Image (cartoon, helix red, strand yellow):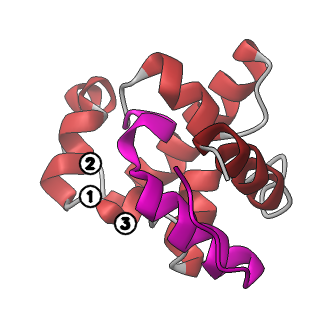
């Protein structure tokens, strides 16, 4: 399977896990799937990625920061007319680099995790 095909298949699977209130970063963190979303970052790393929020609220808790980051991701999806944070971040690159952060091997492993199918991505 090509990288583009793998991403399309993952996108299809992941969109089904999200809704109007929960971006993929939040869902992945809560379910411990895919890239682990917000949970892949230490508190320090998350604060650095959302520095503009932390600057205005230096005492913000991680839970509060994740809630605001979730809303921000959903807003970016709406503004850019994209259905999943990974697509947005591939273009915006502030929380992460979206699909560009992942190797072909990771994409294949996540396809297996989500679909149960063994897939070689290249």
Task: Say if 30 sits above or below 13 in the image.
Answer: below
State whether residue 23 appears in this view: no
Q: Residues within 10 Å of mark 2 (few under 14, many from 20)?
A: some
Q: Residue at x 18, y 37 (%)?
A: 48
Q: Which residue is mark 1?
A: 41
Question: Which residues, given as a range, are shown in magenta?
Answer: 96-122
Which of the 4 quarters of the picture holds residue 56? Answer: top left
Q: Which residue is mark 2?
A: 46
Task: Find numbered disc 1 in the image and state the secondary structure of the residue it sits on.
Answer: loop
State whether residue 77 appears in this view: yes
Q: Looking at this view, is 63 or 73 the one in front?
A: 73
Task: Find numbered disc 3 in the image and state the secondary structure of the residue it sits on.
Answer: helix
Q: Is 78 positioned to the left or the right of 31 in the image?
A: right
Task: Say if 106 sits above or below 57 in the image.
Answer: below
Q: Which residue is mark 3?
A: 39
Q: Are marks 1 and 3 in contact (CB under 8 Å)?
A: yes
Q: Residues within 10 Å of mark 3 (few under 14, many from 20)?
A: some
Q: Looking at this view, is 107 or 31 the one in front?
A: 107
Q: Looking at this view, is 34 or 54 the one in front?
A: 34
Q: Is 28 positioned to the left or the right of 14 in the image?
A: left
Task: Say if 111 sits above or below 65 in the image.
Answer: below
Q: Looking at this view, is 84 or 112 the one in front?
A: 112
Q: CA distance from mark 2 to mark 3?
A: 9 Å
């Amino acid at each position: 399977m090509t990288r583009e095909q793998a991403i399309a298949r993952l996108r299809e699977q992941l969109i089904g896990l999200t809704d109007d209130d929960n971006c993929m970063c939040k869902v992945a963190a809560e379910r411990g799937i895919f890239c682990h979303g917000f949970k892949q970052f230490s508190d320090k790393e998350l604060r650095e990625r959302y520095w503009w929020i932390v600057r205005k609220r230096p005492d913000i808790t991680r839970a509060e920061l994740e809630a605001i980051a979730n809303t921000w991701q959903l807003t970016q999806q709406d503004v850019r007319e994209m259905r999943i944070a990974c697509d947005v971040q591939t273009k915006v690159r502030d929380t992460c680099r979206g699909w560009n952060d992942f190797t072909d091997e990771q994409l294949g492993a996540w396809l297996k995790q989500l679909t149960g199918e063994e897939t070689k991505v290249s």
